[in-house]
Amino acid sequence: MPTIGSLQIPCHLQDKFLSCKYKPYMIDEYEQLRRPRELWSRAVVWMVGIFIVILLMAVIPGCSRSVLKEERGFALREGDLLFQDLDCGSLCDAIEKVTTGYHGANFSHVGIVAKDDNGNFVVFEAVQNGVQAAELQSFLDRSFDVNGRPKVVVGRLKRRYRYLIPSALKQARHFKAKPYDRVFAIGNESYYCSELIYEIFLRANDNNPVFTLQPMTFNDPETGTVFPAWKEYFSRLDVSIPQDRPGINPGGISRSPVLTIIYAYGVPGGWEKTEPIGR
């Protein structure tokens, strides 16, 4: 007598048709045999999908992967200064054109590294919304070089000045939520990015400057006239342009003799070295 499958269901021919007899328990047995195969097929599909996602994150520049996990042989510290080549348009271009950073780098922003209450790295910075503590990864993800690396360079205070760092970070936390200094005036209880760094170390050092103020310029060196972007900016604020008044900029701080540039996450614009240092 013929049978069907591994269930051994008895069958016989009747009027040229195959007739099979089965009992209810046979259906349950068949389901038990079929279900493991379906589960295995689904598991294979999931494994292939996860592999594809991991592969894409590994090869596509600028994905939301953490660059922190890629840095080998470098350990960030509290008090390190992060110099950034931002791509923020005509104002950033104007800043970079009249200021010179370390090895010719174009820096338009700077912040200082600290740790939050959970021990995670943050960056205290002065931005349009005021003084804030940005997540480190968020800070690094703002602008990238042609290789998809953050255009950020790390400066570290020389040993003789490092005793100032705890007090400077205390000041930075105190300044959190202070307004942004839109008119670039020293001493008005509002702060632009490099002014924040200047001020917290000034106070940490008993009002003795650690970084040096220089006369500011808002003029295009090629024409000798005010950059159109700055002219429009100060016109909207209805204030005079603070030409030649004391100020400070990220590029100037990056060249300060009190610190050493120790690492580059990527290659900022204007960088004169063929390879980033520290990598």
Image (cartoon, rainbow, N blue to C red):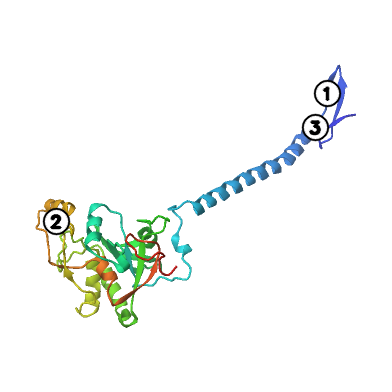
> Which quadrant does the C terminus fall into?
bottom left
Between 226 and 133, the residue placed more toward the observer is 226
Marks 1 and 3 sit apart, C-alpha to C-alpha, by 14 Å
187 in relation to 30, above or below: below
Horizontally, residue 265 falls left or right of residue 224, namely right
Q: Would you say the residues marked 1 and 2 are in contact, meaning their CB atoms lie under 8 Å apart?
A: no
Give the percent coordinates (x, y) of residue 274.
40, 64
Query: What amino acid type should be assigned to the residue bearing mark 3?
Result: Lys
For marks 1 and 3, give the one nearer the viewer.
1
> Which quadrant does the N terminus fall into?
top right
Horizontally, residue 24 falls left or right of residue 112, namely right
Q: Is label 2 in a helix, a strand or a loop?
A: loop
Residue ID at (44%, 53%): 64
Between 3 and 56, the residue placed more toward the observer is 56
Q: Which mark is residue 19?
A: 1
Residue 157 appears in the rendering: yes
Query: What amino acid type should be assigned to the residue bearing mark 2?
Result: Val
Instruction: List the single residue furthest toward the top.
Output: 15
Residue 131 appears in the rendering: no
Q: Is label 3 in a helix, a strand or a loop?
A: loop
Determine which residue is flagged by label 3. Answer: 23
Determine which residue is flagged by label 2. Answer: 226
Quarter of the view holding residue 174? bottom left
Give the percent coordinates (x, y) of residue 200.
24, 72
Q: Is label 1 in a helix, a strand or a loop?
A: strand
Instruction: List the single residue furthest toward the front.
Output: 222
